[in-house]
Amino acid sequence: MKPIFVMIKCELGKAYDVADSLVQQIEQASEVYSTSGDYDLLVKCYLDSDADVGRFVTERLQTLPGIKDTFTLITFKAFA
């Protein structure tokens, strides 16, 4: 499993609806946080090692109602 972090910009007034959709519909989403700044939400997803990150983001996340924009961070190593 490989973790990715996706920052999500929502349509005005839709951040809570988008967060609920992520939790209920995206099984790969392990954590969803509200954030301040340019983006409204930060979601941590665990994908299979051979999963296509681009397809996951564009087909599963960006198609959820209320999402305007995403910024994906691919990680390499976790430090404890």
Image (cartoon, grey):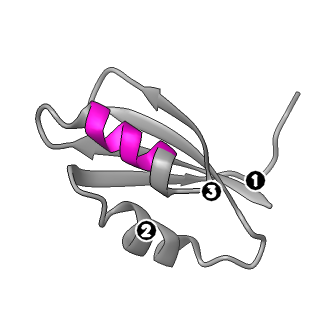
Whole-angstrom CA distance, mark 2 to mark 1, is 22 Å
Q: Which residue is mark 1?
A: 76
Whole-angstrom CA distance, mark 1 to mark 3, is 18 Å
Above or below, 31 relative to 34: below
Of mark 1 and mark 3, the one earlier in the sequence is 3
Above or below, 60 relative to 20: below
What predominant SS class does the magenta segment belong to? Answer: helix
Considering the numbered disc 2 on the image, is that residue within a helix, a strand or a loop? helix
- Please provide percent x and percent y for residue 54: 49, 74
Which quarter of the rendered picture does the C terminus lie within? Answer: top right
Q: Residue at x 46, y 37 (%)?
A: 42
Would you say the residues marked 2 and 3 are in contact, meaning their CB atoms lie under 8 Å apart? yes
Q: Is residue 46 magenta?
A: no
Considering the numbered disc 3 on the image, is that residue within a helix, a strand or a loop? loop
Q: Is residue 22 magenta?
A: yes
Which quarter of the rendered picture does the N terminus lie within? Answer: bottom right
Looking at this view, name the residue that lies furthest to the front.
Answer: 24
Q: Residue at x 14, y 43 (%)?
A: 11
In this picture, which residue range is highlighted in magenta? 16-23
Would you say the residues marked 1 and 3 are in contact, meaning their CB atoms lie under 8 Å apart? no
Considering the numbered disc 1 on the image, is that residue within a helix, a strand or a loop? loop
Quarter holding residue 16: top left
Q: Which residue is mark 2?
A: 60
- Camera-side mark, 1 or 3: 3
Q: Is residue 39 visible?
A: no
Q: Which residue is mark 3?
A: 28
| Crowding at mark 2 (Cα within 10 Å: few <14, some 14-19, many 20+) | few
| Crowding at mark 3 (Cα within 10 Å: few <14, some 14-19, many 20+) | some
